[in-house]
Amino acid sequence: MKRQYELHFVRHEKKYTLRVIFDGMTEISSWKIVAINCGACFGEFGSTNSYQELVEAAGRMGIENVRWNRASHTMAFSERAELKSQQIKIVDITNA
């Protein structure tokens, strides 16, 4: 079952939080997701299953202290309202 997770990490001494939908988060998958989100090539991180290798490679990118938890809520009312105000209506004109 896919669930929402929050990934917390530090990159170049600045804290970040990333929210993702994923099927069964683990320590290894959290490091992979953060590294790829920060610009790493999937080919470099995708096939690696060694926790130590992931931490070392991410460290070379300035990433450290990756931790994760299940998101405490799916989306607050204010977040939903903000998204709704930014939506663009797409109209199919091919059948008009």
Image (cartoon, grey):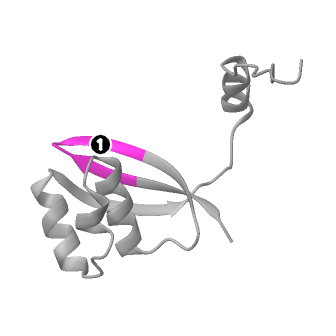
Residue type for callout 1:
Lys
State left or right for residue 30 relative to residue 72. left
Q: Residue furthest left?
A: 60
State left or right for residue 58 relative to residue 28. left
Where 64 sits versus 14, above or below?
below
Q: Which residue is mark 1?
A: 15
User: Residue at 75% across / 22% down in the picture?
Assistant: 90
**Percent position of residue 12, x then y:** 16, 43
User: Residue at 25% across / 78% down in the picture?
Assistant: 51
Between residues 5 and 39, which one lies in front from this camera angle? 39
Where 69 sits versus 95, above or below?
below
Give the SS element for disc 1. strand
Quarter of the image that includes the C terminus = top right
Which residues lie in the magenta part? 8-17
Where 68 sits versus 48, above or below?
above
Which is the main secondary structure of the residues drawn in magenta? strand
State left or right for residue 69 relative to residue 46. right
User: Residue at 50% across / 71% down in the picture?
Assistant: 25
Quarter of the image that includes the N terminus = bottom right
User: Residue at 74% across / 32% down in the picture?
Assistant: 77
Residue 31 among those drawn in magenta = no
Residue 14 among those drawn in magenta = yes
**Percent position of residue 89, x then y:** 76, 19
- Which of the 4 image quarters holds residue 50? bottom left
